[in-house]
Amino acid sequence: MIIRIGSINDLNQIYQIEQLCFLGSPWPLKMIQQELLDKNDRKTWIIESDKIIVGYCMVRLVPKEIHLINMAVIPSQQKMGIGQKLLNHFLDNTPPKTSVFLEVKRSNFPAINLYLNTGFEEIAVHEKYYSDGEDAIVMCLKI
Ligand SMILES: CC(C)(COP(=O)(O)OP(=O)(O)OC[C@H]1O[C@@H](n2cnc3c(N)ncnc32)[C@H](O)[C@@H]1OP(=O)(O)O)[C@@H](O)C(=O)NCCC(=O)NCCS
């Protein structure tokens, strides 16, 4: 497995995984495209096997903070340690004294477990944050 920074060339593969992973509420193609543009305030980390993308993690950078805004592993390869590997790699490449924030649906146990496993802590709840009325759990990890 190789972990690298994504580019606009990865758009279609990422969009396919996004649709498989977030049934009913995938990000639109345009939104993913915006994250893959070569800008200073964003990065997409990609994990691939034999040049096939199996997971990604999108982050936004602000001074002393990073916001993890999207993360997914292709369903056929979930629960094999890929998400953990990708998250660890991204965190290993995060400068010291950075706070990493994310929001996750209250019912998303796989993701919440992954983040708790990695050292994230719940710091707040945004009630009815998502369009389906679900709460968002806000989590943070200080590097
Ligand atoms: C969340 C997600 C990225 C995890 O990726 P993954 O490669 O399957 O996760 P890993 O195999 O690396 O698992 C790491 C840890 O996550 C937790 N975890 C992963 N899948 C889980 C599941 N189905 N049930 C409970 N815990 C789970 C476990 O704590 C696991 O550690 P363990 O294997 O020691 O028990 C993946 O399930 C996914 O893409 N889900 C759909 C998209 C999504 O919800 N993204 C997050 C948005 S905030």
Image (cartoon, rainbow, N blue to C red):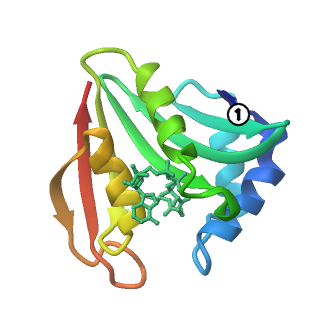
In the displayed structure, would residue 22 be above or below residue 91? below
Callout 1, which amino acid?
Gly
Residue 103 in percent (x, y) is at 34, 56
Q: Residue furthest top?
A: 96
Residue assigned mark 1: 6
Where, by quadrant of the figure, is residue 30 drawn?
bottom right
Q: Secondary structure at mark 1?
A: loop
Q: Quadrant of residue 47?
A: top right
**Seen in the image, is 110 located left or right of residue 106?**
right
Q: Residue furthest bottom?
A: 132
Q: Is mark 1 within 8 Å of ligand 1?
A: no
Q: Name the foreground residue: 105 vs 42.
A: 105
Q: Which image quadrant: the N terminus?
A: top right
Q: Nearer the viewer, residue 39 or 85?
A: 85
Across and down, in percent, residue 124 comes to 15, 57
Residue lying furthest front in this view?
80
Residue drawn at 48 percent across, 29 percent down = 90
Q: Which x, y percent locates residue 60?
A: 47, 37
How would you rate the neighbour count of disc 1 (Cα within 10 Å): few for under 14, some for 14-19, many for 20 or more? many
Q: Nearer the viewer, residue 1 or 71?
A: 1
Q: Residue at x 62, y 77 (%)?
A: 23
- In the picture provided, is 59 more to the left or to the right than 102? right
Quadrant where the C terminus sits is top left
